[in-house]
Image: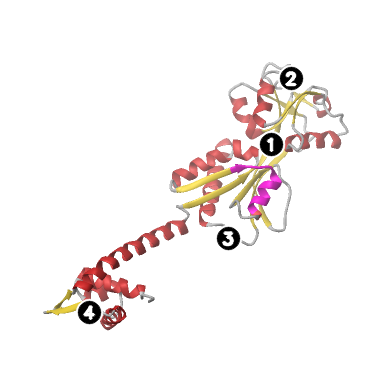
Amino acid sequence: MTMNLYGLIVFHHVATTGSVTRAAEVLRISQPAVTTHVRNMAAELGVPLLAPRGRGILLTEAGERLAAHASRLFALEQDIARDMAAFRDGTTGKLRIAATSLPANFLLMEQIAAFKLACPSVSVSMETRNANDAMEALLQYEADIAVIGGSGETREELTRLVLLEDELWFVVSPFHALAGQTLSLGELFTEPFIMREEGSAARDRLLALCRIHGAAVPETAIQVSGAHESLHAVAAGLGVSFVSSLEARRAIARGELARIQVAGEAELHHPIVLYTRDGEKLPPVAQQFVNVMLKQMKAVIGSEL
């Protein structure tokens, strides 16, 4: 037997208000409609649910039993409505982010913290992947958004939004002889460099600069894998490194590193890009996160101007 669930909700209001008239007012339907729903429910179950009592109503034993069930159903309906409203507003649910190491380590944590303050009930997970894997995770619905550092790549299936144009800086130990100086790229490339691993965006950009300016690839003082390792090698005085400003900014502010300025020969920018699935509306939680992230980033950038 398939039960009329709306009829149960109508009966719940009759039972809790003790009146067909008041139930009709609460539900904003006519009194005859309420009476019909209750009559149909009694016929469907094969038992009387109400007995007359003067101007009011009296629940039969079957009616009392049904009222208890209907009360639980109504509570569940209210829970469902609240949960779906919160999901629709982006204040509950799951947020899955795929990100490359630069935004994962030096940008997104602050954005996630701001988002969690606004939406504490949301479960957030972030996986650090290379650029291709992050895009594939997005396309395979393993992630809701992808945030990729240094990406100029476009794909038909994805929409690309540049969040910020990060700069690439040449940095050294504050005790290095070139700390704080301004050099040409040719002069700078005579120094030993701390090189990042094969496939690193910073390494690729450095080698591209060598090709563009016809300069020899700098001598490798040490090759490291990862941004943190590169910064530690610089601070130890092992050589020059070519790093994201997001990676180096705090260490420079603390006096642990120093910049070398380049004499206007190169456009040293490194975009941080948000990717979403093209033609699809973002899940509510993901849209809420993007809204918070853009607002937070705008505030941070404004404070640095």
Give the residue type that dot 2 points to: Leu
Taking depth in this image into account, of 45 and 224 the one nearest to the observer is 45
Give the residue type that dot 4 points to: Pro
For the residues marked 1 and 3, what is the alpha-carbon distance in whole angstroms?
31 Å
Is tag 4's residue or tag 3's residue first in the polypeptide sequence? Answer: 4
Using the rendered view, name the quadrant where residue 223 is placed: top right
For the residues marked 4 and 2, what is the alpha-carbon distance in whole angstroms?
94 Å
Q: Is residue 30 above or below residue 243?
A: below
> In the rendered structure, which segment of residues is drawn in magenta?
127-138
130 within the magenta span: yes
Q: Viewed as shown, does residue 251 lie left or right of 296? A: right
Work out which residue is located at the far left of the displayed protein and give it.
Answer: 54
Q: Is residue 229 above or below residue 10?
A: above
Give the residue type that dot 1 points to: Glu
Q: Residue at x 86, y 30 (%)?
A: 215
Task: Point out the frontmost of discs 4 and 3.
Answer: 4
Residue 178: assigned label: 2
| CB within 8 Å, label 1 to label 4 | no
| Magenta span dominant secondary structure | helix
| CB within 8 Å, label 4 to label 3 | no
Q: Residues within 10 Å of mark 1 (few under 14, many from 20)?
A: some
Residue 48: assigned label: 4
Secondary-structure class at tag 3: loop
